[in-house]
């Protein structure tokens, strides 16, 4: 692996995190497989890795719900090597208190300052919500990827969301001040236009890579598409806001802007939700996430940690072999895979010829 772009989680310790009382894991630089029965905490380990990168869970938006039942705090600690340098991350959550996040013993003032230091991509069954859920899921997806390599973007999204909230409050208020509205409009336009341009750039460069991965995993050519949709493609944002003013006043919220964007996931010009089989949908999602990883590596100069949760559930053995072979190549870095069948995964891992480590999670095991 190239030292310049490599990062590696060497050791992870969990205290009172979900089903874990206390646990420590030592990982190898390439493929790490967590094997164990359902409910033994495989996904929880992957989510802990995600947490230390993104300062939050991939699965549960409430920090305190990740605290082990009957305890009042959790602590996650990770020891990394990043571009050859050691990094130590600490995340502590105590009920009723502000989350503490530290890099090399130094507290972050804003969690957002940390995003992008240790890039990560999670592939999990929950990705289904990208296909089945509303447009908010797909905006969240775009945000998650872009924020990891573009710091201005994350700040823009935070300011934009704040401005939408304030503008909506003003639209609801009985004392309406046009000048204050202009202030919020100005903020929306500035940040919204930048977010719009970032999303265009992101989608344009993601599409060819996504298609290539889809072809490789599906082993055939199918007409898959990602189509970015924004009202800002039709009209200038300031004009949109002016034109929708009366409507916004009546409805008492902001009806136009990049908070209405969507990313259409299509096959043969039809939403994949309707046109794709379950296997095609899953292939679509995995290709999308692998493309993300590629994208982040090229833009951050660091190869993201790749978390593959329950990848084996929906795929046949041949396709699983394909994917594992793909991610064992050098353009992917350290990988974490979960699986219930130890022997099955070991056979696949041996075939890659890569360095790998098997770690077992077990019920009744004293974590
Ligand atoms: N806050 C919590 N406190 C204690 N146990 C929890 C908490 N959240 C989840 N769990 C437990 O974690 C287990 C699920 O772990 P998970 O990582 O999803 O398992 P796996 O991926 O191996 O199937 C469940 O038994 C669940 O009850
Ligand atoms: Mg699981």
Image (cartoon, rainbow, N blue to C red):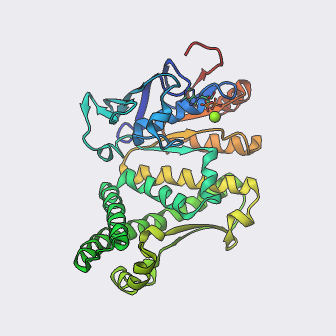
As drawn, is 138 to the left or to the right of 150? right
Q: Nearer the viewer, residue 256 or 305?
A: 256
Residue in view at x 30 percent, y 32 percent: 102
Which residue occupies 59% across, 33% down? 43
Q: Residue pushed farthest front? A: 174
Q: Quadrant of the C terminus?
A: top right
Give the percent coordinates (x, y) of residue 29: 47, 29
| Quarter containing the N terminus | top left
Q: Position of residue 243 (x, y in %)?
A: 39, 87
Residue lying at 61% horizontally and 14% vertically, measured from the top left: 365
Residue 161 lies, with reference to residue 335, above or below; the image says below
Does 8 sit left or right of 356 as displayed?
Answer: left
Query: Is any atom of residue 13 visible in this view?
Result: no
- Is 43 placed above or below 59 here? above
Residue 75 position, x and y percent, is 40, 25
Numbered label tally: 0
Residue 89: quarter of image? top left
Residue 285: name its quadrant.
Answer: bottom right
| Residue 101 visible in the shown view | yes
Ligand 1 falls in quadrant: top right
Seen as rendered, the residue at the extreme top is: 366
Question: x, y percentage for residue 196?
Answer: 39, 70
Q: Is residue 116 left or right of residue 104?
A: right
> Residue at image x 33%, y 74%?
174
């Amino acid at each position: 692996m190239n030292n310049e772009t490599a990062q590696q989680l060497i050791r992870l310790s969990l205290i009172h995190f979900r089903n874990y009382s206390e646990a420590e894991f030592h990982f190898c630089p390439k493929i790490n497989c967590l094997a164990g029965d359902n409910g033994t905490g495989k996904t929880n380990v992957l989510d802990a890795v995600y947490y230390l990168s993104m300062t939050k869970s991939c699965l549960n938006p409430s920090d305190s719900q990740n605290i082990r039942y009957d305890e009042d705090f959790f602590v996650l600690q990770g020891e990394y090597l990043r571009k050859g340098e050691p990094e130590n991350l600490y995340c502590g959550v105590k009920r009723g208190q502000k989350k503490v996040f530290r890099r090399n013993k130094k507290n972050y003032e804003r969690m957002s300052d940390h995003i992008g230091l240790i890039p990560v991509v999670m592939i999990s069954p929950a990705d289904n919500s990208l296909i089945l859920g509303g447009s908010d899921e797909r905006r969240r997806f775009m945000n998650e990827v872009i924020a990891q390599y573009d710091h201005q973007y994350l700040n823009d999204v935070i300011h934009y969301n704040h401005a939408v909230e304030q503008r909506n409050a003003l639209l609801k208020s009985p004392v309406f001040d046009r000048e204050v509205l202009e202030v919020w409009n100005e903020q929306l336009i500035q940040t919204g236009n930048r977010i719009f341009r970032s999303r265009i750039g992101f989608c344009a460069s993601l599409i060819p890579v996504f298609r290539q991965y889809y072809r490789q995993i599906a082993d055939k050519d199918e007409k898959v598409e990602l189509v970015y949709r924004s009202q800002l493609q039709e009209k200038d944002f300031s004009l949109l806001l002016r034109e929708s003013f009366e409507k916004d006043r009546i409805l008492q919220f902001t009806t136009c802007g990049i908070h209405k964007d969507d990313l259409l996931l299509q096959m043969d010009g039809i939403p994949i939700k309707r046109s794709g089989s379950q296997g095609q949908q899953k292939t679509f999602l995995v290709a999308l996430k692998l493309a993300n990883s590629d994208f982040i590596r090229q833009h951050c100069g660091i190869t993201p940690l790749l978390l593959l949760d329950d990848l084996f559930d929906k795929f046949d053995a041949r396709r699983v072999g394909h994917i594992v072979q793909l991610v064992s190549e050098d353009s992917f870095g350290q990988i974490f895979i979960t699986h219930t069948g130890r022997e099955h995964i070991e056979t696949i891992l041996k075939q890659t010829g890569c360095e790998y480590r098997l770690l077992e999670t077990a019920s009744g095991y004293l974590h």
